[in-house]
Amino acid sequence: MQKIVVASNNAGKLREIRSILEPFGFETLSQKQVGYELDVEETGTTFQENAAIKAQAVFDALHCAVIADDSGLVVDALDGAPGIYSHRFAGADATDAQRNNKLLEMLKDMPTEKRMARFICAICYMDENGKQHFFEGKCEGIIGTQLRGENGFGYDPLFYVGGKSMAEYSTAEKNQMSHRAEALRQLEKYLERSFSIC
């Protein structure tokens, strides 16, 4: 298997990335698995900038091909919030439940037709020469009024597509529609065309 280091230790992200790339012969390794323990400060103003910052930091340390992603939830009624601050939306150490509860509170009087939202994922792939390649995926939906489902992570229990929350879909189903899956499919096609990894 060809190896790619994923600039993350987020178990949910790693699971999604592995499930999509490994069937094509790519072994995905977390930062922790390769001994990189530093937390990279995300100082960018866009998903793409933050993905690039994370990828560059890991590449500079390991000099190997890296995948980094930055993703989040964009809610129209909140002028695009939480956006790039999705993880820190309810505070730096908040849980998924606290973030979801804050979102529910902010939208509590909002009618369904104004609860439109989308997940966005920007992926930065840095090849073994340090060149950056970007891929972006989106998934349109609405913010529900209650948490539903046991699968997924983050805002999945509140993000509804096709009448179900993302947390009610199986991993296989989610990988057909998610923002990260779309971006990873673009990456996978690129890697198939020109693949060279340390």
Image (cartoon, rainbow, N blue to C red):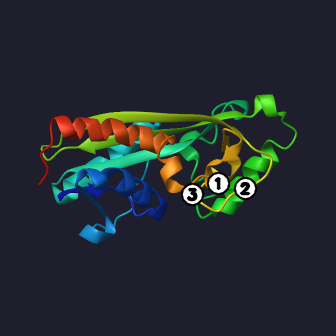
Q: Is residue 36 above or below residue 86?
A: below
Q: Quadrant of the C terminus?
A: bottom left
User: Real-space Cα distance between discs 2 and 3?
Assistant: 11 Å
Residue type, numbered disc 1: Glu
Query: How crowded is the residue under tag 3: few (<14 C-alpha within 10 Å), some, or many (20+)?
Result: many
- Mark 1 = which residue? 168
Along the line of sight, which residue is nearer the eye, 139 or 106? 139
Q: How many neighbours does mark 2 have within 10 angstroms: few (below 14), some (14-19), or many (20 or more)?
A: some
x then y, percent, for residue 38: 34, 65
Type of amino acid under label 2? Arg
Report the mark closest to the observer, 1 or 2. 1
Residue located 40% across and 38% down the image: 183
Q: Secondary structure at mark 1?
A: helix
Disc 2 is placed on an element classified as loop
Q: Label 1 to label 2, Cα distance in Å?
A: 7 Å
* Residue placed under numbered mark 3 in the picture: 152
Q: Is residue 49 visible?
A: no
The mark nearer the N terminus, 1 or 2, is 2
- Of residues 91 and 122, the one drawn nearer to the viewer in this rendering: 122
Q: Which residue is mark 2?
A: 148
Q: Is residue 43 above or below residue 9?
A: above
**Residue type, label 3:** Gly
How many marks do you count on the picture?
A: 3
Secondary structure of the residue carrying tag 3 is loop
